Image: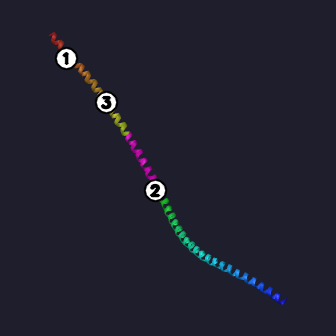
Amino acid sequence: MENNEMKMILERFDRIDSKMSEMDGKISALDTKVSNMDGKVFDLDKKVTSMDIKMSEIDDKVSDLDKKVLSMDIKMSETDGKVSSIQLAIEDEIRNNIQILAEWHMRLERKLDESLKVNHEKELLLIWVNKLETEVRELKENIEKIS
């Protein structure tokens, strides 16, 4: 039985050896896959680092844009204030000028009315004088006829 036992032990060792060889193959394949993954992780890490740098640059640019927009907002507010001030000044000045023009227009209209009234009276007087001249001429003619 010793021989038989030995045979069994050897068979078991052979099976263990076979399984160990099989496991060595699997571990080698796994080691290759892990190595490949290490390379990919390294590449991925480089890409993430590159993206971090780009994101940092973008953040800087966005910060600069924010500052510029804030500066523009301040300038726009100042400009709005100046435009409102100018608009009020112009409105006050225009309102005053319109009032002055209206007053002068009324004065001119009154003067025109007075002038037209005088002209109308002149015309009536001229008509009256013409009528009187005509009557005087007629009277003269009548007197000449009688004399």
Where residue 100 appears, as percent x and y from the top left, is: 38, 42
Please tell me whether mark 2 sits on a helix, a strand or a loop.
helix
Position of 53 compared to 142: left or right?
Answer: right
Q: What kind of residue is marked 1?
A: Arg
Q: Residues within 10 Å of mark 1 (few under 14, many from 20)?
A: few
| SS at mark 3 in the image | helix
- Marks 3 and 2, how far apart in space? 53 Å
Q: Residue at the left extreme?
A: 147
Q: Is residue 141 shown left or right of residue 128?
A: left
Residue named by callout 1: 137
Contact flag, marks 3 and 2 (Cβ < 8 Å): no
Give the x, y percent position of residue 69. Answer: 50, 61
Mark earlier in primary sequence (3, 2): 2
Q: Secondary structure at mark 1?
A: helix
Residue at 34%, 36% in the rendered image? 108
Three-letter amino acid code of the residue under disc 2: Thr
Q: Are marks 2 and 1 in contact (CB under 8 Å)?
A: no
User: Which residue is the site of mark 2?
Assistant: 79
Going by the numbered disc 3, the residue's amino acid type is: Leu
Residue extent of the magenta highlight? 79-102
Q: Is residue 107 above or below residue 87?
A: above
Nearer to us: label 3 or label 2:
2
